[in-house]
Image (tube, grey):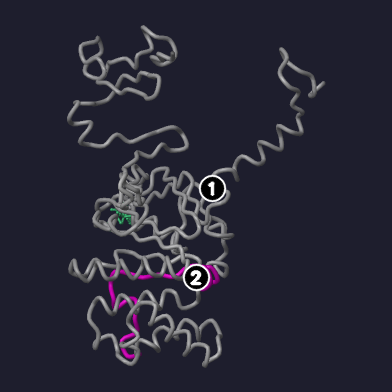
Amino acid sequence: MDHGSTVQGAPATSLATLEERARARPEAFGRTSLIVCESLVRIYQSEGIEVQALQGLDLLVDEGELVAVVGASGSGKSTLLSVLSGLDVPTAGHVRVAEWDLMTMTARERVEYRRSTVGFVWQQTARNLVPYLTAAENVALPMALAGRPRRQRRTEAAALLDVLGVAYCADRRPSQMSGGEQQRVAIAVGLANSPRVLFADEPTGELDTATSNDVLEAMRAVNRDLGTTVVVVTHDPSVSDHVQRTVEIRDGRTSSEVLRRTATRDDGTEHEVAEEFAVLDRAGRVQLPQDYRETLDLVGRVRLTLEQSHIAVRPGDRGAPGGEHAGRTGRDDQPGHGRRAR
Ligand SMILES: Nc1ncnc2c1ncn2[C@@H]1O[C@H](COP(=O)(O)OP(=O)(O)OP(=O)(O)O)[C@@H](O)[C@H]1O
């Protein structure tokens, strides 16, 4: 067989080249990202009922990003965080953080991953801090478990408390600190062994608005000053005011993203611009926001038309034989899924 021959003037592609491309493909998605979730599925069995908590979730986070993951209760946020923190293994898909493949890690590797690569801040302050240790001792504890010398522990714990703006709490126990102070100390604990990523699960869930803002600003400082990648999971959409990128999860999939950037007006002054995008997943699926669907009464089948610069989505034909969902996708009058390419 001549694998190098050309077909109708097309350039020759050898079998070896095709094989090389096929091998390279699985790595192509998120090759340069720090966190890669690809088609993640997590199914729970509960009393004989199957719950699909993650339904083919794709997510990429680059090194140095500060990302919020938001979503309604039950959308799959905690499940995603359990997977990323190495506490849970997905039913299917691919998940990698730095060089760690979280699907195939051994128990020993899991412990090492949790100790060296990731740090955590949980919603419940009691889960973050040991009540009978001072703030400085709490921060030094993970360093001691990693075998670092006492003197280094003391200076680095002090430096971290300083970055988080709670140096004055160094000698206080958790009960002698406010909720916001406790969470800022908890961030310092999460950063004790210089992780690549800090995961925070509803870190402001038990705080009032003003204190929440302080804690979120502290996370921003950590990201900016220490360069740590930060992923905050929360049901609070206002968190997007504090981060460059907010990913929304709906029904176990990433559905939309809000990106914030600084824009310059004609007069040279700067202002923040937030833009919302729908997420196109790797299979080409997009979730239409519920309010759009309701406004146009989009149910079941819809008509797609390819216009010059966009794709139009219209209600399907309700009157066609076959009932309510018997609309066409525009294939009948225009070949190729209603394409109207010009
Ligand atoms: N251990 C479990 N067994 C059975 N079902 C589960 C389990 N954990 C989560 N689920 C289900 O999976 C879905 C996603 O749950 P998850 O906790 O990830 O959502 P969430 O977005 O974090 O919600 P919340 O904001 O309320 O914490 C829900 O329907 C939940 O009931």
Kindly report the distance in space between the C-alpha atoms of the residues bearing marks 2 and 1. 20 Å
The kind of residue tagged 2 is Pro
Q: Is residue 291 magenta?
A: no
Image-quarter location of ligand 1: bottom left
Foreground residue among 163 and 304: 163
Earlier sequence position, callout 2 versus callout 1: 1
Q: Is residue 62 visible?
A: yes
Quadrant where the image shows the N terminus:
top right
Q: Position of residue 216 (x, y in %)?
A: 30, 66
Task: Assess disc 2: are there few (<14), some (14-19) or many (≥20) residues with their C-alpha within 10 Å of its C-alpha.
Answer: some
Up-down: is 169 above or below 55?
below
Tell me the residue at 71%/32% (across/down). Answer: 18
Identify the disc placed on residue 30: 1
Horizontal arrangement in the rendering, residue 67 relative to residue 295 (left or right): right
Identify the disc placed on residue 60: none
Horizontal arrangement in the rendering, residue 283 relative to residue 3 (left or right): left
Up-down: is 195 above or below 178?
above
Numbered disc 2: secondary structure: loop
Asked if disc 2 is less than 8 Å from ligand 1, the answer is no
Horizontal arrangement in the rendering, residue 199 relative to residue 148 (left or right): left
Give the quadrant of residue 182: bottom left
Q: Position of residue 145 (x, y in %)?
A: 51, 83
Up-down: is 15 above or below 46?
above
Identify the disc placed on residue 195: 2
Q: Which residues are magenta?
A: 111-133
Tell me the residue at 26%/56% (across/down). Answer: 235
The kind of residue tagged 1 is Gly
Residue that extends furthest to the front in the rendered view of this protein: 267
Q: Is residue 1 visible?
A: no
Q: Position of residue 79 (x, y in %)?
A: 37, 56
Q: Is residue 128 magenta?
A: yes
